[in-house]
Amino acid sequence: MDAQTSLLDRLFDAGLLIDTGVEGLYGRSGQFEDVIAAFERYIDTFGGADGAEAIRFPPGMNRAYFEKSGYMKSFPQLAGTVHSFCGCELDHVSLLKSMDDGTDWTGEQKATNIVLTPAACYPLYPTIAKRGNLPAKGGLYDLQSYCFRHEPSTDPARQQLFRMREYVCMGTEQHVTDFRQTWMDRGVKMMAGLDLPVEIDVANDPFFGRAGKMLANNQRDQNLKFELLIPITSVSKPTACMSFNYHQDAFGTKWGLNLEDGAVAHTACVGFGLERIALALFHHHGLDVKQWPEKVRKALWG
Ligand code: ATP
Ligand code: ZN
């Protein structure tokens, strides 16, 4: 059995994650959720004084915004769309018959106006653009959402529905790159406070196809994405538990995000993979939270 399956099985056995029969789709126990809640409060102790505006979107977003975002150009393999039955009574009869026959009943399902949110910040950009120019000090937002990515796996750190906590910064190039550096430094400090071993490395997004290879290389060459990695199921391939992304003025241009003087805004975001951080804690400190080092318990629960 490989390390991924064995950790997943141990999490099921301990009742921390609950099997649903689908890879990457799990229930969470109260204890697992308590670790995530404590870690989110821990984030607040580092970022709370920055005065970010908190906004919570549901895990589905406006399909028109999703289409405009270009997600299907870059990551069609990961997207999830919401489809519903929109037929008449006759269609209903044939749907039920297909189900009874065990043939495909989903073909007639129609796309709704909702798409599953792929990253917590996606619904933010059009929302902020609608408000008009940014204030003189720029914009800073605190987000958290369940996100969907179609990447079924037996690695418990690669789920299909997982939570991302994010801070998003909008402003001048200097302002948003300073923001990103601040969070890279904070991320290292935060994980040290939880006795988790980390390294920071340059990274790229999983762009689709052959053209995607060029986009990925470009992203790396320009240092647009960094990740904070913690070993969970592999030491040689540690898991990305935070990411630090500088979008230059790409989102500013796409969504019409402007500074107070009308110039196009630059944007950056930092994301915490909440399940991955909880799993890193369970992997390094054991499945019984009561046995975690006093220092770690104190940092999380006071
Ligand atoms: P990876 O390279 O591991 O697939 P990513 O580059 O896709 O990660 P981002 O798009 O930057 O990750 O997402 C922000 C954060 O969300 C990641 O740093 C990670 O902690 C978390 N995350 C991403 N994908 C998953 C997943 N499938 N399951 C759990 N957490 C995830
Ligand atoms: Zn990914």
Image (cartoon, rainbow, N blue to C red):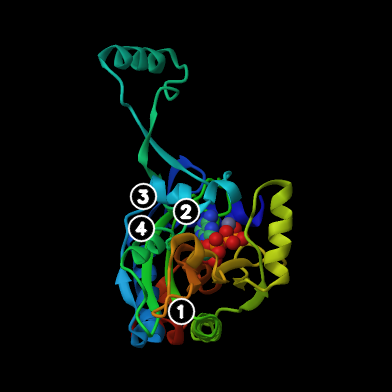
Q: Is residue 164 visible?
A: yes
Q: Within 8 Å of ligand 1, the CB of disc 2?
A: no
Of the pair 274 and 15, the residue shown nearer to us: 274
Q: Residue furthest front?
A: 262
Q: Amino acid at mark 3?
A: Gly
Q: Earlier in the sequence, mark 4 or mark 1?
A: 4
Task: Give the structural element (helix, strand or loop) at label 2.
Answer: loop
Upstream in sequence: badge 3 or badge 2: 3
Residue at the (33%, 63%) spot, across then down: 130
Q: Name the residue carrying label 2.
A: 118
Mark 1 residue crowding within 10 angstroms, few (<14) / some (14–19) / many (20+): many
Task: Pinpoint residue 78: horizontal percent, then vertical percent.
Answer: 55, 47
Which corner quadrant of the figure contains ligand 1?
A: bottom right
Q: Secondary structure at mark 4?
A: loop
Looking at the image, which is closer to me, 97 or 230? 97
Q: Are marks 3 and 2 in contact (CB under 8 Å)?
A: no
Which residue is outermost to the left? 89
Q: In the rendering, which numbered label is found on residue 29?
A: 4
Q: Closer to us: mark 3 or mark 1?
A: 1
Sequence-wise, the earlier of marks 3 and 4 is: 4
Q: Which amino acid lies under the numbered mark 4 shown in the image of this protein?
A: Ser
Q: Is residue 298 visible?
A: no
